Image (spheres, rainbow, N blue to C red):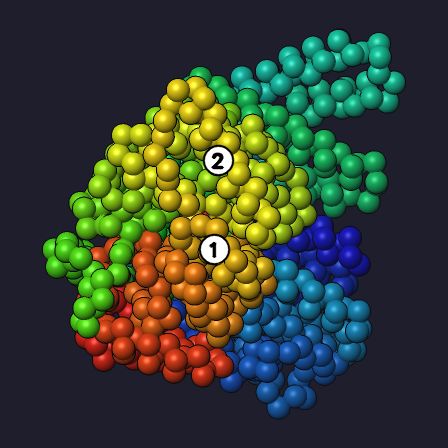
Amino acid sequence: MLPVLRRIVQEVNAAEDLGHALKIIVARVKETLEADVCSVYLNLPGSDQLSLLATDGLQPEAVGRVHLSYNEGLVGLVAQRAEPINLSEAHSHERFKYFPETGEERFHAFLGVPILHYRRVLGVVVVQHAAPRRFEEDHEAFLVTLAAQLAGAIVSAEITGELLAFNPSPGRAAARVTGIAGAPGIGIGRALVCFPEKDLFAVPDRVAQDVPKEIERFRAAVERVQTDLLAIKERMGSLLPAEDRMLFDAYMLILSSETLNRGTIDRIRQGTWAAGALRQTIEQSVADFQGMENDYLKERASDLKDLGQRILQQILRTEQNPKQSFPANTILIGHELAATHLADVPLEHLAGLICTSGSASSHVAILARALGVPTVMGAESLPVTRLDGREVIVDGYEGQIILQPGDEVRAEFARLAQEEKELDKSLLSSTQGDAITPDGVRISVMVNSGLMADFLSEKTIAADGIGLYRTEFPFMVRERFPGEDEQARIYARVLDLFPQKPVTLRTLDVGGDKPLSYFPIEEDNPFLGYRGIRISLDHPEIFLVQLRAMLKASRRHGNLQILFPMIGSVMELEEALSLLERAKTELFDEGITVPTPKVGAMIEVPAAIYLTEHLAAKVDFISVGTNDLVQYVLAVDRNNARVASLYNDKHPAVLCALKMIVEGAHRQGRSVSICGEMASDPVSIPLLLGVGVDSLSVSLASLPRVKHTIHHFSCDTARDLFNHALKIDDPREIAHLLEAAMVAHGLGALVRAGKS
Ligand code: PEP
Ligand code: MG
């Protein structure tokens, strides 16, 4: 039965809307189980009833007219119990309820299966027989499996608002999707879906601006693929075996087929842009092919995908393809957004960011925080391809996405966003001076950076320098390694921003989730693989160029600090230091004298925690990268949405690690800075003050809040809090302790959204 099930699921996924999908389900299930009836009842948003939405076997007029609550009838009982009910004689069950409009009095056998999504009952699928005989166990298993697969399609329809079309009462309910809070703030705008050009199945539905032009784009693309394939065939024809030549013929047939051409053009005529129409046609045809019994024909599904991909590339390459524009209040949505996507959008037009993968410590979220763009990560259930152009609210505080908000919901979020803006403004003016605790301890608060755009803000003036400049971002937006002079120019601009203050440039930390397109690394486990200093030490030709560029750039102000990432042993640090010496000597030999920079080692690998004292002896300062430290100490991938709830910088093991690091560095008389995102969270500040860190490097957007928190917590109070937290096992309790302390110090507004 598995192939049948797969075929039904594919057909359902390719259906143009939920109405069609439900019709396919009831027809196919009835046929497969040789039942007399199959029906689907769903719980519509904003209603507490189950409504009959599709049937094959009951009176068709009953669709949309039969509604039952959870304590009514057998269907209600299936939903109530959230488990299947299989009866040979439904009429004799005490919960049996007869709905005259269905004409179901003839049917005796009943099998109902709930449709569940993360414990929530979305609806019920029912099959019935006229004859009083129990449905077989196999049939029950089939229906349970199908219902589980259906749940995703129903949730998508709920999110996109499609389910509302079935709602008999006009009340509109906003759809909420929960993800992971990525960057705080409220963004209200319209969705713009980013998709990788190499993935046809990620192309979003989008309205065609100019139908004839879109048809032309599609036709031209098909023609170009035909020409290309013919050229390949001619070039390679005599070298290819007969079967492979036949493959070309099969491709040509598909390219000129009615299904592809008429199917796509009809969809464009109905108002979809060429790329989206192509995706829909290919999805439909792939489902048809994969559902075939014949293995040869089944295989043709992969040819279709390949051809679809080729046509897509041509469509996107055509000159008529309008250049992507970014309207005001753009909410960027994608499966895997990268730092480079952010760089494409003018910041003033970017209202929010939604990523269906990743978590709060992914680099794109870090960048979004630096830029102050409200962000939700890991929103896995979001049907991205159906959201382009829709109104969306991003709640970066709660990690929520709200679709089709009504006027009231929109107004409520707008009020919250306004309050946040006012709070920011008032904090900005009160945090221009030094960050000094009420008991007189001055904490240096620097900023993290990677993009020059970070510095277009007046907040910069309040910073004590740059505690972490991620040099990999300028590498990521290029198509090759930047040369020495090019790098020196970039670094000089960063060093110029704070001529009188320290500016910390971190050496290249690519690998992990920061790939370079021109330096591909294929690994099963990138975070435990080739990244950071490991690459630099293996590639002195890259590392020395970078060090020389940094040193050259430092000549003007002498404010350079160099930071080495991912240090795991004393030997690695020694090697990095000796290459730094070599860079200096080389420059000296070339007649260029440079000031000696301060040097720091990052503590982000567990091995380095234990070695802090030894490492500190060899450098000027220690900087803790809590983003990686937490991921490695807790063995929780910082990018994996599924384990995001386990990623916790208030875990007792993290607090113990911080204590060990601070004590180790202080024994050597070295200062400790925190440059991971933990330092940007006001709630963590009392912990960091309490453990005794000397400085913080935070995202620009959070700078006023962090300084404001420091102004309110004496080091003594913070120390007591830290020691109290050390005695607690549950990280949630530690978070509560800290939040309560914030509220008690009049800082409740920094714990949650809104001023009150
Ligand atoms: C960290 O790991 O905390 C850090 C600052 O480095 P990155 O986030 O760039 O890995
Ligand atoms: Mg790191």
Which residue corresponds to mark 1? 617
Q: Quadrant of residue 376?
A: bottom left
Q: Amino acid at mark 2?
A: Glu
Please state the horizontal and vertical placement of residue 282, each as a whole percent of the image: 62, 35
Given contact means CB atoms under 8 Å apart, are the residues at marks 1 and 2 in contact? no
Say which residue label 2 marks: 581
Q: Residue at x 82, y 21 (%)?
A: 244
- In the picture, the disc for residue 113 is none
Is 89 left or right of 151, judged from the image as shown?
right
Identify whether 235 is placed above or below 187. Answer: above
Give above or below for 472 relative to 96: above
* Cα distance in 3D space between marks 1 and 2: 17 Å
Q: Nearer the viewer, residue 255 or 348?
A: 348
Q: Is 566 left, or right, of 441 in this rendering?
A: right
Tell me the SS state at disc 2: helix
Question: Could you tell me which residue is drawn at 59 percent across and 69 percent down?
Answer: 115
Q: As displayed, is residue 59 above or below residue 317?
A: below
Place of residue 297 in the rendered image (x, y in percent of width and height, measured from the top left): 79, 36
